[in-house]
Structures are given as C-alpha cells and as structure tokens.
Amino acid sequence: MGILCAEIEPYLFIGKQGSGLLMCYDVVIIGAGPAGLTAGIYARSKMMNALILDSGRVGGQLVSLYPEKGIHNYPGFETIQARKLSDKLYAQAESMGCEIREFEKVNEINNGEEELIVVTNKNTYHAKSVVIAIGMGSFKPKKMEVPGEDELTGKGVSYILPSKEELVGKKVTMFGGGNSAIDMALIADSVTDTSIVHRRADFRADESTVNNLKNSAVKAYMNSSLVSINGTDKVESVTIKQDDKEIVIPTDLAIINIGISADLDDLKQWDIELNDDGLVKVDFDMSTNRPGIFACGDVVSYPGKYKQITTACGEATTAIFMAYKFAKKPYWA
Ligand SMILES: Cc1cc2nc3c(=O)[nH]c(=O)nc-3n(C[C@H](O)[C@H](O)[C@H](O)COP(=O)(O)OP(=O)(O)OC[C@H]3O[C@@H](n4cnc5c(N)ncnc54)[C@H](O)[C@@H]3O)c2cc1C
C-alpha cells in the first residue's frame, strides 16, 4: 500500500503496515554529522517534522576520527574540542524536536506513489523529501600497512587520539603531516613525550599550525617512513627509516593519522548521479538528479569545494530550504 505523503498531517500515524506504525516525515536526513545535524536544526526552524538517521553514532568525523582535537575555525568559538562541538549540535537538533536514530544504516531510497521510501537495516520510513548528508560514507581510517599494525591495534596502535588522561605517562608517536596530525601531536605534547613522523620534507598543514609545532617540545622526524610497529602484547617501539638509516623510537602509543578511505557505494544503489570523483553532483540549490532528494556536506563536490564544517553547515541550510519548498510547496515558492 502506498502512502500519499501529500495527504498526511505532520506527526499523524496513519495505520499499520508490516510490524510497525507508519508516519510520513517532511524530511528524512541521512547522516548525523555537522551537515545532517544542521539540516535538522533548519528543518525544525521551518516546522518540518524531521528524522535524522545515522549508521553509527551522532557526530560524524568529529567523534569517530578526531574527538579530542581542537577546532579553531568554527565561527563563534576561538577553539572548541571536536567532541564538544558535536555535542552542542546534537543537543540543539534534539531540543528543537528532531527525531534522531543511531545505528540505522540507510540501504535504499525508493520512489513511492507520491513520496520517497527510505529503507534502513531496521525500518522503513516514508518522506516527502530526503537530504543525503553521509559525508565520506562508511569511512575507515587509512592504514600504514606495516608489520605489527593489525596485530597491535587496540594494544597501543590507534587511529584516533585517546583522551589526555589516557596519554599521561605514555610515549606517543604520531604518524601524519596534516593539520589534524599536528594538532593531535600538540595535544599529546601538553601531557607527555611526543614525536611526529612524516614521510615528506615539509608538513602539509597551515603555517600557524606548523609554527606551533616548531615552538613545542614535539620531536619531528621528517623524510621518514614507518618500517614496523614492535611489541608482543602491547606496543613497545616503532622502527622508522630516515635517509636509509633505521631508527627505533620507544613508543607506548602509535597514533596513525594519514587520512580516511571513503566508502560511498550506497550512492550507486540510490541512483544518485555522481561526479568523476565519485561524489554527488548537485545543482547550485543542492538538488540531485532525483526529485525531492537533496545533498550536502563532504559527500557533495563541485569546483572550488572545500571540505570543512562551515561548508557542510552552509550547504545544509540551502538543502533544507529547497527541501522545504519541495515538501511544503508554500504559495511564494
Ligand atoms: C582528521 C580530520 C580533522 C578535521 N578537522 C577539521 C577542522 O578543524 N575544521 C573543519 O572545519 N573541518 C575539519 N575536518 C573536516 C570535517 O570533519 C568535515 O568537513 C565534516 O565532518 C563534514 O561533515 P558531514 O556531515 O558532511 O560528514 P561526516 O562528518 O562524515 O558525517 C556523515 C555521517 O553520515 C553517516 N552515514 C554514512 N553513510 C550512512 C548511511 N548509509 N546511512 C546512515 N548514515 C550514514 C556517518 O556514520 C557519519 O556519521 C577534519 C576532517 C578530518 C578527517
């Protein structure tokens, strides 16, 4: 039985289908990173009933990749820890009345009679519009692919920075050369002995960040590659190669921060048109090739795109404005 969203009042349950009661949302937002949460906040400010679904925990990359890192470029906060910014966005979306469901992966977005049908690993939802905000998809941190890495993961090898309390008294070696690797090395340096290993001669981070590193006690090994991570039950050291010379650095925590691999196969299943880079092709109004489906955040690409939190939030604002016009059809649209 199809459900005609156009005829349904917000929040009205309209009957039983399968094992659960169904309702029709004005918008279903896929992904609860900065883009999805901002979309939820804007949807509620337009009195749209909004459901946000995430395959993992709320917060996106901010909680799964760099919870301890300070964010220095989000307006309104000189510096805010990533986890705290995520908590604030979550609290705001929830207090405004968004329904948020964690650990629900969206598998399908099908066309109904006059609505879109979103199928997850747990439920089926009906919506007048959909906003795709899945960032890098089911992303995974990139690995160094060296002996000892897999065996010692969770035993001293980590892809995110543990809390400061957990770092005290441990020797930390960070791998990577971007802003986040340096930021995390500086956090570690504030409580413990820290080294950073980068395979190139120069860091690829902002000048101010590199200056902070130079003024810190972090020991930098440039032009260096990781040979192995050593230890039996836990990490004891790492071996690096610099100018054909092997150096062993005593280490308790080897933190790998060399980027993430995106997994965006879902988009192909959803018949969403993609650019050559595999990211979503949108019009200037964040619309995709499928009517009623909009996209925002890291999952979207266009010339000049800069993958940042503020960019994700701005695109979400536009996506929801267009979803509102599509779902509510105001007389002035
Ligand atoms: C190490 C690092 C440091 C960074 N530092 C900064 C910084 O200091 N300042 C800054 O502005 N930017 C920074 N960024 C970039 C910033 O994190 C991203 O631009 C931002 O997270 C994009 O937000 P998003 O909501 O588009 O995607 P994400 O944050 O990736 O969120 C997407 C969400 O969608 C969910 N999802 C994926 N597939 C599905 C599915 N099929 N069904 C349901 N849910 C799904 C994921 O679980 C995830 O929670 C950094 C990035 C990294 C990797």
Image: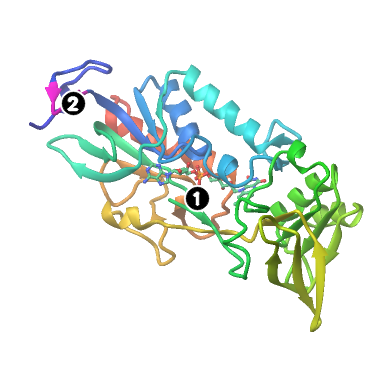
Q: Earlier in the sequence, mark 1 or mark 2?
A: 2
Would residue 153 appear left or right of 285 to someone viewing this image?
A: right
**188 or 267, which lies in front?**
188
* Quadrant housing the N terminus: top left
In-front residue for pair 5/141: 141
Q: Is residue 19 magenta?
A: yes
Instruction: Give the alpha-carbon distance from disc 1 to disc 2, as whole Å.
Output: 31 Å
Residue 6's disc is 2
**256 falls in the magenta region:** no
The x, y position of residue 270, in whole percent, is 27, 51
Q: Is residue 265 left or right of residue 123?
A: right
Extreme-bottom residue of the structure = 244
x then y, percent, for residue 292: 28, 40
Q: Secondary structure at mark 1?
A: helix
Residue that label 1 marks: 298
**Foreground residue, 241 or 24?**
241
Compared to 4, does 14 lie above or below? Answer: above
* 266 is higher (above) or lower (below) than 242: above
